[in-house]
Amino acid sequence: MSRRKSTTPTRRKPAGKRSGKPARNTVGKPVRRPLVLADVRRQIDSIDEQLHALINERARLAQDVGISKHREGHTVDFYRPEREAQVLRRALERNRGPLRDEEVVRLFREVMSACLAQQEPLKVGFLGPEGTFTQSAVLKHFGHSVRALPLHTIDEVFHEVEAGAADFGVVPIENSTEGTVNNTLDMFITSPLKICGEIELRINQHLMGNMQDLKQVVRICSHQQSLAQCRAWLEEHLPGVERVAVSSNAEGARRARDEKGTAAIAGQTAAEVYGLHMLVSDIEDRPDNTTRFLVVGPKLFEPSGKDRTTLLVSGGRTEAPGALFRLLGPFAKHGVNLTRIESRPSRRRKWDYVFFLDAEGHAADPGLSQALKDLKAQASLFRVLGSYPQAVL
């Protein structure tokens, strides 16, 4: 016997209540329930409480580490750049957003800085005055819980660290546009200090002053490196304006504050410190303009897993055929990559030179260690200036 189909209309279930599935709009996409702002804020408050408790717990553990090292130690003994580099690299590996890698590194750097400062803030000398890019490099590498000491010259930075008045120093070593800072290289020829770390800082150059229009600019004061990094822009937009090289960008900003008609080229920090407003932003000629800085201190550190080693070497009579070739041979033999070679006058006699070499790896790594052993056997001058973590971002 056949069954007759029911003519009674099927009752539809209310949207969003069939089989536990979410409601859908006319194009088949789930309809999101409106957020209740008060609920979201309560969740944020709860997370903030957990974060605060965990940060304090981390600080207590860091304090225990400091005590366990030795009770009579100084703050400089508790600072371990290789350990900090490892922490930051792991943070980057874990990061899935939405925070950018740069923000994650900055947050973890500040947490480590605050934890270390429980003993006593590190004293870090830098090429001042306040408002220079070197100060920005200090804060990027060490965080804001340090005592940043502005000094007048690169020589003074080295001398203050050598004398123990500063725990570490930060000095510029090279710019991606203008090349090497020779004064820094020359200091390593006579200084006993070691390289403990490196910092790469993206350099944005801004034209700033108290005037309202570019037509009112009579002269531009800045460090010679900054003037060179903006050469093409200046030629195009301010071709007849006097350019005055000064000791630092901060000095240029000070003059722009105090002198009518004077503008400066400097970073955002200088504009804030000296109360200047931006005339034109980002006037550097190259969009990837970057300066590399070195951290100098009294001792070498252990490997971090991704390091760089800087050497000072000489083969004796550099005019002899094949002198540089013989110095570089051990690196090729043991598969070590060199990333930089610079020559400087040795200051021992005229036309005599020393070489600064940057190699990938730590001096304790097997391949590099053997290359250094072979190099030392034939070099008339051989010094490991530092084995240190490569810059993290």
Image (tube, rainbow, N blue to C red):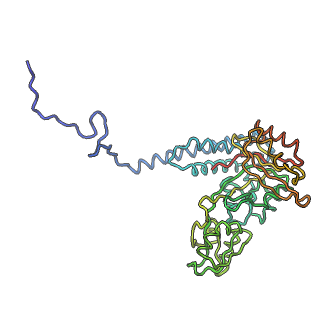
Q: Is residue 208 above or below residue 191?
A: below
Q: Is residue 189 above or below residue 390?
A: below
Is any part of residue 131 visible from this angle?
yes
Residue 177 position within the rendered picture, expressed as x and y whole percent measured from the top left: 67, 61
The foreground one among 198 and 329 is 329
Residue 71 position within the rendered picture, expressed as x and y whole percent measured from the top left: 79, 42
**Dividing the picture into quarters, in which one does residue 93 lie?**
top right
* 11 relative to 181 in the view: left or right: left
Residue drawn 34% across the image and 46% down it: 33
**Dividing the picture into quarters, in which one does residue 158 lie?**
bottom right
Is any part of residue 79 visible from this angle?
no
Outermost residue on the top side: it is 1
Residue drawn 61% across the image and 49% down it: 105
Residue drawn 74% across the image and 54% down it: 294
Residue 373 position within the rendered picture, expressed as x and y whole percent measured from the top left: 84, 39
The foreground one among 209 and 75 is 209
Residue 240 position within the rendered picture, expressed as x and y whole percent measured from the top left: 64, 79
